[in-house]
Amino acid sequence: MSKTGYEETGEPGSDEIIFLPLGGTGEIGMNLNLYGHAGKWMMVDLGISFDDGRTPGVDVIMPDPAFIEERRKDLAGLVLTHAHEDHLGAVQYLWDGYDCPIYATPFTAAILRRKLQENGFLNLPKIIEIPTSGHFQVGPFDIELVTLTHSIPEPNALIIRCDAGTVMHTGDWKLDPDPKVGPTADEAALIKAGEEGVLAMVCDSTNAMNPGHSGSEGEVRENLVELVGTLKGKVAIACFASNIARIESAVKAAEACGRKVALIGRSMHRMTEAARETGYLQDLPSFISDEEVDRLPPDKVLLICTGSQGEPRAALSRIARDDHPTVSLGEGDAVIFSSREIPGNEIGIARLQNQLTELGCTVITAREHDIHTSGHPNRGELAQMYQWIRPSIAVPVHGEVRHLTAHAELAQECQVPHTIVPFNGDVLRLSKTDGVDVIDEVYAGRLALDGDRLVPFDSHGIRERRQIAWNGCAVVSITLDRKGALAAEPAVTVFGLFDPDDRDRDGLTAAVERVLGKANARTRADDKQIEEAVRIGVRRELQSITGKRPPVSVHVARI
């Protein structure tokens, strides 16, 4: 092993490949991966995740790129595997200040440009469009794109070649024999890569616990056409806006049943515009506008809506609250959820479905009909990929720990010599002679989009807000004279614990007075000691009344 490798210098050596996940490993979402070789780094994907509702005011979470920011002069480029939010959504928040190019296929580039422009980027970064199955160079890495199938156009695996070996980074994928939009997986290129020799495969683990195969979009289209044909009244189909094949399937179902289609939700329009701009959805009829929906008989309308995950501001949630400016649903209408529940969204989805049911809608999900298929590989597809690629090292990513562990066990069953279950921040050295080793551990934090600011997800302000959300809070104002005696009645304001006419709050003023009555002369002369004594006294009183321990802030004024 070279004496000038990462362990000695902190920089990747010329005879080693370093793999470092900073997001998306041990979790699903906010992918950020780094490859290091010959003194340079390449970033693969830069995505976001969404808060599960436990942090008020925070909607978007993303990996903290501090490690690579410190080495930005050695960052050769960012390669995007596809256009899902968990793979490119953080670029609009984090990329300002990087001067290296971004590489993406045409559809992914079209989505990224729209997001950057919407976010106010005055000077767009250098985005280099790479054709599907294209080859290009990023620093010391020679990259070949290999077409796979997924729930969005142009998903790509990366064959990453350098002097120290070849790595296959799958991105998100499945093996769909009938994807409807885009080609099937490039089996020939995968087999060729395996025959040439692959040192390591860094691979999607989302469905590693699921047996068999994930299913085909072609089957979903047939089932949607059949289902829509049985329904009366308006029909709304909720799906991910990025699933262009599903949108096309919904349109085909509408055509088969003599219905006109309206896209409801801004991201639906953004995605379909990008799709048409890059050659997809070319043979579909024109959509009707929101305003035209109510001018047609209900059984002649099909809506394709955002909001399948119960997002409060999405179109379907607004319709369910009767808050949409032009579109309504009610008795005799049907809503089809052609999507899966992302973990953490169950409560919001159930709330939305209940609201729709209260309106008189029939709610139909993938539990009752085969109207959704995953975009990720089940165990049968993973086994097939290992048969094609035959790597020496298996590195499971894109999954929670249970998914990574199941994936590693499957790789061992597939006779892969070396496997590992990595975590964000693990610095892995991929070696022809030694297999895979964790040679370092670096900071892999989280950033939260808090209003218009990016702050550490574990910052004092975020932690304090969570505490207030669960426990309420109190503010105490005390006016003392020069001797430390009360010059006015204490003012105690409590948030989130009492109703306005609740008499339990009356005991708090007495608690302040008791604390001050017990204070000696030295304590009365010191504002800090008074603040701390009153804080503890009021918090104990609140705990005895409510069973909660809210944060208490005390302000002392002297006259």
Image (cartoon, rainbow, N blue to C red):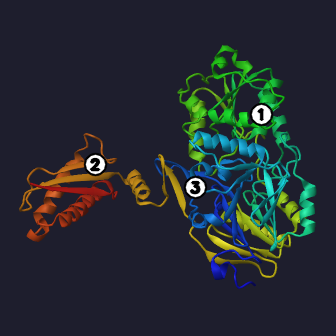
Is 528 in front, or is 176?
A: 528
Q: Is residue 552 left or right of residue 167?
A: left
Q: Amino acid at mark 3?
A: Gly
Residue 212 visible here: no
Question: From the image, which quarter does the N terminus lie in?
Answer: bottom right
Between the C-alphas of marks 1 and 2, the distance is 55 Å
Query: Which residue corresponds to mark 2?
Result: 494
Between the C-alphas of marks 1 and 3, the distance is 31 Å
Q: Position of residue 281 (x, y in %)?
A: 80, 33
In the image, is residue 496 above or below residue 539?
above
Q: Amino acid at mark 2?
A: Val
Dot 1, crowdedness within 10 Å: few (<14), some or many (≥20)? few
Residue at horizontal 71 percent and vertical 47 percent from the top: 83
Residue 138 visible here: yes
Frontmost of labels 2 and 3 is: 3
Dot 2, crowdedness within 10 Å: few (<14), some or many (≥20)? some
- Where residue 548 sits, quadrant-wise, is bottom left
Q: Position of residue 339 (x, y in %)?
A: 70, 42
Question: Which numbered disc flags the more N-terminal residue, 2 or 3?
Answer: 3
Query: Which residue corresponds to mark 3?
Result: 97
Dot 3, crowdedness within 10 Å: few (<14), some or many (≥20)? few
Q: Position of residue 435 (x, y in %)?
A: 78, 78
Frontmost of labels 1 and 2 is: 1
**SS at mark 1 in the image:** helix
In the image, is residue 432 above or below residue 21?
below
Question: Which numbered disc flags the more N-terminal residue, 1 or 2?
Answer: 1
Between the C-alphas of marks 2 and 3, the distance is 44 Å
Query: Which residue corresponds to mark 1?
Result: 276
Q: Amino acid at mark 1?
A: Arg
**SS at mark 2 in the image:** strand
